Image: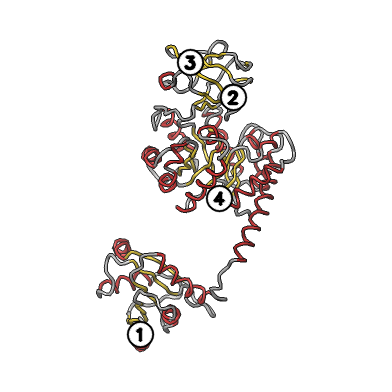
Amino acid sequence: MNVTRIVGTIGPVSLNEQTLLQLREAGLSVARLNGSHADLDWHRNAIAEIRRVLPDVPILLDIPGRKIRTTQLAFEPSFLAGEEIILTTETDHDGSKKVPVNYPDLHADLRTGHTILADDGTLRFTVVAVAGRDIRIRAETAGQLKSRKGINVPFVKLNTPQVTPRDERMIAFAKETGVDFIGLSFVESAGHVRAFRDLIGSSSPRIVAKVENQGGMDHVDEIAEAADAIMVDRGDLSVETSLHDVALRQKRIIAAAREHGKPVIVATEMLHTMIQNPFPTKAEVSDITNAVLDGCAATMLSGETAMGDFPVEAVRIMAQVATAAEAHVQADLEAGKPDIGANVADAVGNVIPALCRALPIDKIVAITRSGFAARMIARHRPRQPILAVSDDAVAARSFNLIAGTLGVVSDVPFRRDSGDHIPRVLQQLHARGLLAADDMVLVVGVSYPGKNTRMNTVQIHRISDVMANLA
């Protein structure tokens, strides 16, 4: 099993039993559905099919959120550089004369001279004039503006609401169908995450916050703290900020997510050429490798698995590249591995001083029948006092010879088949006045002891939390 998870977008070419099973066999970890495409009936059927074929695979539903897109067009206009077309916020047009967009106030936010990008920045336009709800734009590049393509207006503050009526419908749909995650577009603050958390009203589906613009970059730490996971959406990020430093922004987002212990997904064009080709480019292989080296939790495939010619091959190659990168990471970790001991007890005893230095630990509680745990800790001379607790009164007395240690006898039976006695010991120490409610304590003990199994349990507790839970 790969350490790096693989998120694959399920679309027309992959929504069938055979391909779904092949994708999982190749390394698929999470099935993604793009809520910006198709209707809810299609997604409802897709969710049901994924659940039937791959019941243990989590589903991520990417909801449009604040993403601006062209609507479904009957006519998709083509143009040369220098030609003009009209965008409009009136939705009753088919693209033949005007191209409607799904954000009803776009005309109010734009001014002459503003730049508009479309289709992940591959199309560039300049606003020539705004008249009523129409936005006349001049093409700076030749191309074709297609249905449901993203529209970006870099460095322009848009007055889109945090939660739209469509978002409310999508959240209701996500809850109804029981998806595991929602992908939330253009997150710019912890407040944005909380607004959706309130709308969800429970812990599931969990929120994947997509960092895609400068607002998200400016508040990436608070977003990482508030969300359940982060996605680096490089398509919009590169056009909403700048292309030349998108890799550096990716590193910043990954670092913020890891700092807060949140999984982070790297997305957009990771194997883009495999939509049409059976093999990736060397640059794509390097891209996946560097994302793994940076510490991402998952890499993502979009069109490659949704509509590409080689969906299974794309997942397989991504898994192979990730495996090679993971081996390199592990080798580096092993090479730099500190000498903390050859057995569990030595390792635990040696890392406790680092924990006591890194955290505001007030006291150390060693739950030990023989005094072994107390001795192993005391040899490092931690600044925190050690309370060595035994259910043997004679042994407990002897612990007072150990440096920095107070021997305490307890009448709580020490269990061999669980660690259930640990909170009861803490409760007793609190009742005796040896631990205060606001103390943060590091607890060392043994659970499920066997031959040569000693000091295999480390817990950190705020005593007031223990008391509240026991009550």
Disc 3 + disc 1, Cβ < 8 Å = no
Which residue is drawn at the image coordinates 49% and 37% (left, top)?
A: 177
With 166 as the anchor, is 149 left or right in this view?
right
Instruction: Say which of marks 3 and 1 sits in front.
Output: 3
**Residue 396, located in which quarter of the rendered image?**
bottom left
Q: Earlier in the sequence, mark 2 or mark 4?
A: 2
Mark 2: amino acid: Leu
Q: Could you give the CA–CA distance between mark 2 and mark 4, rounded to whole angstroms?
A: 32 Å
Q: In the drawing, what numbered circle is on residue 396?
A: 1
Q: Could you give the CA–CA distance between mark 3 and mark 1, rounded to whole angstroms?
A: 82 Å
Mark 3: amino acid: Ile
Instruction: Say which of marks 2 and 4 sits in front.
Output: 2
Q: Please name the residue that numbered disc 2 is placed on.
A: 123
Q: Earlier in the sequence, mark 3 or mark 1?
A: 3
- Counting other residues with Cα less than 10 Å from the Cα at mark 4, is it few (<14), some (14-19), or many (20 or more)? many
Is 296 rendered above or below residue 357?
Answer: above
Is 109 rendered above or below residue 436?
Answer: above
Q: Please name the residue that numbered disc 3 is placed on.
A: 135
Q: Secondary structure at mark 3?
A: strand
Q: Secondary structure at mark 2?
A: strand
Q: Earlier in the sequence, mark 1 or mark 4?
A: 4
**Residue 428, located in which quarter of the rendered image?**
bottom left
Which residue is drawn at the image coordinates 40% and 78% (left, top)?
A: 381
Q: Could you give the CA–CA distance between mark 1 and mark 4, rounded to whole angstroms?
A: 46 Å
Mark 4: amino acid: Ala
Rendered-image quadrant of the N terminus: bottom right
Q: Could you give the CA–CA distance between mark 3 and mark 4, rounded to whole angstroms?
A: 41 Å
Q: Please name the residue that numbered disc 4 is placed on.
A: 297
